[in-house]
Image (cartoon, rainbow, N blue to C red):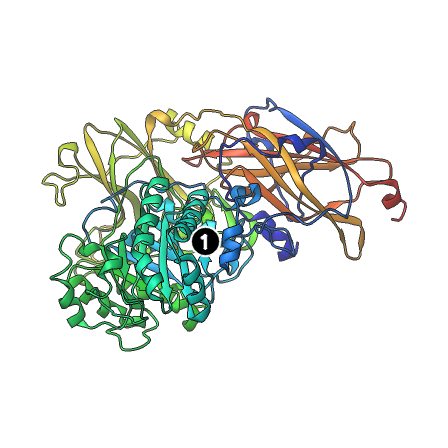
């Protein structure tokens, strides 16, 4: 199968789970779709229980004259769902939430809890993503085929992510919102005005209280509807006296309304305009721009500051120092302290004075140093900064990650290639670890970690851990995650890894805990390091886990399971420890791949079988296949209902096709199509056989939920739909 078809099966959609479908009344005329890069799957791989779920039947007649889909959330060439921006004041004024916009562009992953909370006075780190104008392949909501894509995965080191472009209203692509929220990072859109055109926009919306409130209300509505966390306000043009006097009231009103709609939201002002209305970047907070800072949640300072600017600010920022985000341009343009691979010099000075930092355009490593070496340069860049980047902790169970970074050379399921070919979808990114190089002294060894897409357990990547165990030591360890989670009485741990080159080492997880009474203290006086003993594979809990994780054939990987019994404890850190097997006096070089870590409540290993309901299909488009009269392309949207916040994703399969209604398509093998994070998925330009004259062609589709712990549900919970599609006699007669 060619890559243009293959990419359709690798993608995730991002609408919301659990809402009643708006298209149920279209089921009579709906239909569904199948693809051609198909992986056969035994029924036992999907379900043990052979009871059949509720079956929906849909009859549909093929037509090639369907109208173009409404809304701006579809790619005009393919009808694939895309994220969008707003370019003008007129477009913003006229924008109204459509069903299509809401379903596809609404983030489905809520902002995860974290410690310490965003509101604490610890200096924060903001990353402002500006790359080639924005809305590149990240605009495709369900993912896309791409070799060597740009991805970001140092989430645990940052607090705020701004998606930036030079469009007036930059709405973060939903894949970025899902990835940020999964890592407890707030994500902001951008409202920007520039040059003469920007001045005209400002004169209009800042004319009076009514006009600026109307604009603020519309921006609040957009953030609330699409579930992101606020705005960077960037006015980079001269303002008239009337306009500038209204800016503080605009910011105050905007902030208050955002707080009502999204209680944890942020409005951040960019250092540009003075209180006189003149455009003059200050590179510091001072009496000329403090009126704007006082009206919102923070200020993002321009990049051409020196140490004396930081010194000036220390006397006027007591109580709100963390709300001052000192800008760093990674490209190093202008008169700056540091940039590129000396960005750490700027960050070191900022932290010396206890200010927050705003790192602008860290995609420099991708844009200027080559896509082929991106991951090596990304690792080098962030490794220089981590000393100055306080991390945050994960605060909820279940904890499950296969280290997928939202892309891959293939798509894996339990160590096997499920679909071949490169893909990108940041919504599929799983929790990323603390990437650091622990360059210890030779006597204590060294450990390095990095993601790798050449092999994986689930998704597209695994975590490579490599280093050296010196002759003087029996083991080395590396900390991967920080937690702040109250432990259930019994904790079940699943751990998957493989060792390269038959190195004589064993790898196991290591957890630390502290008493509940010491939770929140920076240095608990009592910390217990737990090195649990493994459970046998015939243990009942292990067998339950394996059954819920089908298909299970971990050839080439080592799978380990553990049970911890704890009382009044806080789970703190997850590490891995690598131990030599031979007791000789030689250094041991090692490299291993961590495929998956799961930390689960042992009492919740049994999966509640909640069924997919109200499966329907709508917005159907048919196209002829050039040069192939016996095939046609189908694009259509599938939608279903499911209890909110219970599924991590849905996998989509089909059986068939067959050519007669009396033939039982359920006798056919299941074929994998794709997966989605939510309860909506658009299948695009997938190839189907043409129906014979006078006979319907039928295919069956299944929607299978996966739990938050990554467990597959039985086929009896799947949504099922049989599509009977027929070509009109005049079409059939011409073939």
Q: Would you say residue 94 is visible in this rendering? A: yes
At label 1, counting other C-alpha atoms closer than 10 Å, the crowd grade (few under 14, some 14-19, many 20 or more) is: many
In this picture, residue 320 sits left or right of residue 401:
left
Q: Position of residue 87 (x, y in %)?
A: 50, 60
Question: Where 716 sits versus 14, above or below?
Answer: above
Front-most of 363 and 411? 363
Residue at (23, 69) in percent of width and height: 346
Question: Where 536 sits versus 261, above or below?
Answer: above
Residue at (57, 33) in percent of width and height: 21
Q: Position of residue 711 (x, y in %)?
A: 45, 33
Front-most of 350 and 318? 318
Front-most of 311 and 269? 269
Q: Position of residue 46 (x, y in %)?
A: 55, 33
Label 1 sits on a secondary structure element that is loop
Quadrant containing the N terminus is bottom right
Question: Where 663 sits versus 472, above or below?
Answer: above
Q: Would you say residue 379 is visible in this rendering? A: no
Residue receiving disc 1:
171
């Amino acid at each position: 199968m060619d890559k243009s078809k293959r990419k359709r099966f690798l993608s995730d959609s991002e609408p919301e789970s659990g809402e009643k479908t708006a298209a149920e009344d279209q089921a009579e005329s709906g239909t569904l779709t199948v693809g051609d890069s198909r992986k056969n799957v035994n029924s036992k791989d999907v379900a043990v229980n052979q009871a059949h779920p509720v079956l929906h039947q849909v009859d549909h007649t093929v037509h090639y004259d369907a109208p173009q889909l409404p809304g701006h959330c579809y790619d005009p060439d393919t009808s694939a769902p895309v994220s969008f921006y707003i370019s003008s004041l007129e477009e913003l004024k006229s924008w109204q939430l459509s069903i299509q916009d809401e379903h596809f562009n609404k983030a489905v992953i809520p902002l995860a809890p974290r410690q310490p909370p965003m509101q604490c006075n610890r200096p924060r780190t903001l990353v402002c993503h500006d790359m080639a104008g924005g809305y590149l392949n990240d605009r495709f909501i369900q993912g896309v085929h791409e070799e060597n894509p740009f991805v970001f995965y140092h989430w645990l080191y940052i607090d705020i992510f701004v998606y930036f472009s030079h469009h007036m209203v930059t709405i973060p692509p939903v894949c970025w919102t899902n990835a940020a929220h999964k890592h407890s990072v707030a994500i902001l859109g951008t409202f920007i005005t520039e040059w003469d055109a920007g001045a005209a926009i400002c004169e209009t919306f800042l004319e009076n209280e009514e006009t600026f409130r109307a604009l603020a209300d519309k921006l609040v509505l957009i953030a609330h509807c699409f579930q992101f966390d606020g705005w960077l306000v960037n006015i980079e043009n001269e303002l008239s006296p009337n306009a500038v006097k209204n800016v503080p009231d605009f910011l105050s009103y905007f902030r208050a309304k955002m707080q009502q709609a999204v209680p944890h939201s942020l409005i951040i002002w960019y250092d540009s305009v003075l209180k006189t209305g003149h455009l003059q970047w200050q590179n510091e907070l001072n009496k000329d721009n403090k009126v704007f800072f006082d009206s919102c949640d923070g200020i993002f300072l321009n990049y051409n500051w020196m140490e004396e600017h930081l010194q000036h600010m220390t006397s006027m920022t007591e109580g709100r120092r963390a709300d001052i985000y000192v800008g760093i341009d990674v490209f190093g343009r202008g008169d700056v302290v540091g940039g590129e691979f000396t960005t750490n010099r700027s960050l070191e000075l900022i932290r010396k004075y206890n200010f927050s930092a705003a790192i602008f355009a860290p995609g420099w490593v991708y844009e200027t140093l080559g896509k082929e070496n991106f991951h090596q340069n990304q690792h080098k860049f962030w490794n220089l900064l981590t000393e100055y980047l306080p991390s945050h902790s994960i605060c909820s169970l279940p904890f499950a990650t296969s280290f997928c970074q939202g892309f891959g050379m293939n798509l894996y399921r339990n160590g096997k290639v499920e679909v071949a070919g490169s893909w990108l979808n940041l919504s599929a990114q799983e929790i990323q670890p603390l990437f650091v190089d622990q360059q210890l002294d030779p006597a204590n060894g060294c450990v390095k970690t990095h993601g790798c897409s050449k092999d994986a357990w689930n998704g597209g990547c695994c975590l490579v851990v490599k280093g050296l165990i010196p002759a003087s030591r029996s083991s080395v360890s590396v900390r991967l995650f920080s937690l702040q989670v109250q432990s259930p009485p019994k904790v079940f741990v699943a751990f998957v890894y493989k060792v390269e080159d038959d190195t004589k080492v064993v790898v196991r997880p290591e957890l630390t805990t502290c008493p509940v009474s010491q939770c929140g203290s920076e240095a608990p006086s009592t910390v217990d390091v737990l090195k649990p003993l493994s459970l046998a594979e015939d243990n009942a809990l292990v067998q339950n886990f394996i059954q819920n994780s089908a298909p299970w054939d971990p050839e080439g990987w080592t799978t380990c399971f553990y049970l911890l019994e704890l009382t009044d404890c806080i789970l703190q850190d997850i590490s891995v420890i690598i131990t030599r097997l031979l007791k000789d006096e030689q250094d041991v070089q090692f490299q291993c791949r961590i495929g998956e870590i799961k930390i689960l409540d042992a009492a919740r290993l049994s999966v509640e079988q909640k069924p997919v309901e109200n499966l329907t299909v709508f917005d159907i488009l048919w196209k002829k296949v050039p040069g192939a009269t016996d095939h046609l392309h189908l694009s259509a949207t599938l939608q279903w209902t499911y209890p909110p916040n219970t599924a991590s994703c849905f996998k989509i399969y089909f059986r068939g096709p067959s050519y007669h209604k009396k033939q039982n398509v359920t006798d056919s093998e299941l074929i994998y199509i794709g997966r989605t994070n939510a309860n909506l998925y658009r299948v695009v330009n997938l190839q189907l056989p043409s129906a014979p004259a006078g006979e319907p062609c039928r295919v069956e589709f299944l929607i299978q939920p996966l739990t938050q712990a990554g467990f597959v549900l039985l086929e009896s919970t799947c949504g099922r739909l049989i599509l009977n599609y027929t070509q009109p006699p005049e079409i059939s007669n011409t073939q």
